[in-house]
Amino acid sequence: MNRKGQGGILMTLLFLSMAPAGFIGCGGNRPDPVAVSDEDLATLRQEVRSILRPGCGSCHTTGLPTAKPDAIAAFDFRDEAWSSPMTVEELEGLASRSKELGEVPRSKIELLVGAEIARREMDI
């Protein structure tokens, strides 16, 4: 293999090692399912809640005068496991809407979505 070919392989490996887990092999807007421990899932939920709460909390938090019944039906930030009752379609929508956020928040959201999807697939 010539030197130019080796550089292409090295750049690909470097990209793969640096890319957020949810982006690799992702078909469309659905992050790949990823198994995480219960503790890691709880931590991800807290982190993503803190990312989403400024823009979504007014509608998705029971007890606030701005809360919307349809939004609460999808998820409620007052619940510790707020993402747990979401359907796969709702989770995919959450991942899709996160495109406007920066790369770090988006990768956290996609990781949470992948973990929640994996949980649902394991329950089947």
Image (cartoon, rainbow, N blue to C red):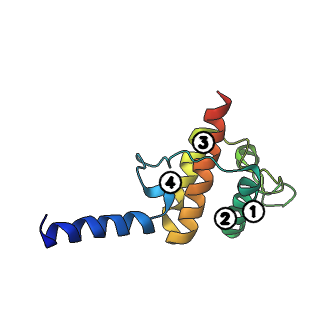
Residue at 13% x, 63% y is 1
Answer yes or no: is residue 103 visible: yes
- Place of residue 119 in the rendered image (x, y in percent of width and height, measured from the top left): 66, 40
Up-down relation of residue 81 to residue 65 (above or below) = above
- Place of residue 23 in the rendered image (x, y in percent of width and height, measured from the top left): 44, 57
Residue at 66% x, 68% y is 51
Disc number placed over residue 117 in the picture, else none: 3
Quarter location, residue 106: bottom right
- Place of residue 34 in the rendered image (x, y in percent of width and height, measured from the top left): 57, 48
Label 3 vs label 2, nearer the camera: 3
Answer yes or no: is residue 59 visible: no
Up-down relation of residue 21 to residue 102 (above or below) = above
Instruction: Give the position of the C terminus as an image quadrant.
Output: top right
Say what secondary structure mark 4 lies in.
helix
Residue at 72% x, 68% y is 50
Q: Which of the two labelled residues, at mark 4 and mark 2, occupies the earlier sequence position? A: 2
Disc number placed over residue 69 in the picture, else none: none
Which residue position holds label 2?
52
Q: Which of the two labelled residues, at mark 3 and mark 4, occupies the earlier sequence position? A: 4
Q: Which of the two labelled residues, at mark 3 and mark 2, occupies the earlier sequence position? A: 2
Which residue position holds label 1?
46
| Mark-to-mark CA distance, 1 and 3 | 17 Å
Q: Amino acid at mark 1?
A: Gln
Which residue position holds label 4?
96
| Mark-to-mark CA distance, 3 and 4 | 14 Å
Say what secondary structure mark 1 lies in.
helix
